[in-house]
Amino acid sequence: MTNMNMELARRNMVLQQVRPWEVIDDRVLDLMARAPREDYVPAAFRNLAYVDMNIPLGDGQAMMQPKIEARLLQELDIQPKDRILEVGTGTGYLTSLLAQLGGHVYSVDSKAGYTAAARERLKAHTIQNVTLETGDALNGWDAHAPYDVIVVIGSLPAIPEALRAQLAPHGRLAAVVGRSPVMEAKLVRRVDGNNFSEVALFETDLPRLANAQDPATFVF
């Protein structure tokens, strides 16, 4: 597909997928209309970069549909000075969007290969306000906490309390929670102290994030 066709596909994605999903934030719409998603998807799926689908990454992981990425960005209401924790880096596409909206992104993936590949892609697009690290951030990432925004790029059976605890005052956390085939995208806000609000945004289905474990249950 030519560059011209990619630009057309990108515009159509915004008009036909993103806007109908109640995304009205001009910052998000403008960003997605110019961000080259095709440079971040695996080479085999380059021509499907703007299709309404989860793009397989291997190892049971996937890129979210563009409309879901856009909706989460809108709901997180990212501000220019926000410190952001991204749990799971994947290809680095959502990382790049977060970085262009916020102050600094700390993105942590459990797979060193994803971290290395994302670093090259972000460097190619001169995205500099990102720190990429390899590890398991599902139980929080103490090195740079607290965070104004936390976003998880794969689904979870439940939101770990450790992630909530690392939200700064008035911080926001977005994650897809539940079990296939029906899950809910949720937005958590730290109201004050240890008081949190939680809102269900929409239903979807997304592969589970690597290393996400079911909560412990009591055995009698």
Image (cartoon, rainbow, N blue to C red):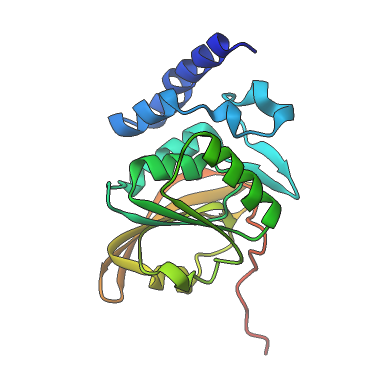
Number of marks present in the image shown: 0
Left or right, residue 125 beside residue 71: right
Residue 5 against residue 44 in the figure, above or below:
above
Left or right: 20 in relation to 60: left
Relative to 101, residue 26 above or below:
above
Determine which quarter of the picture holds residue 40: top right
Quadrant hosting residue 164: bottom left
Q: Residue at x 46, y 71 (%)?
A: 143
Q: Is residue 141 visible?
A: yes
Q: Quadrant of residue 83?
A: bottom left
Q: From the viewer's perspective, is 3 left or right of 31?
A: right
Q: Can the viewer see residue 52? A: no
Residue at 57 percent across and 51 percent down: it is: 89
Residue 113 in the image: above or below residue 22? below
- Residue 133: x, y in percent? 56, 60
Quadrant including the C terminus: bottom right
Query: Is 199 on the left or on the right of 140, as rendered?
Result: left
Relative depth, front residue between 144 and 33: 144
Nearer-the-camera pick, 212 or 37: 37
Residue 204: image location, x then y, percent: 54, 43
Q: Residue at x 61, y 31 (%)?
A: 53
**Residue 177 location, x and y as percent?**
53, 56
Q: Position of residue 78 (x, y in %)?
A: 32, 47
Image point (48%, 16%), residue name: 12
Task: State the residue lying farthest toward the bottom.
Answer: 220
Q: 178 or 209: which is nearer to us?
A: 209
Q: Quadrant of the N terminus?
A: top right
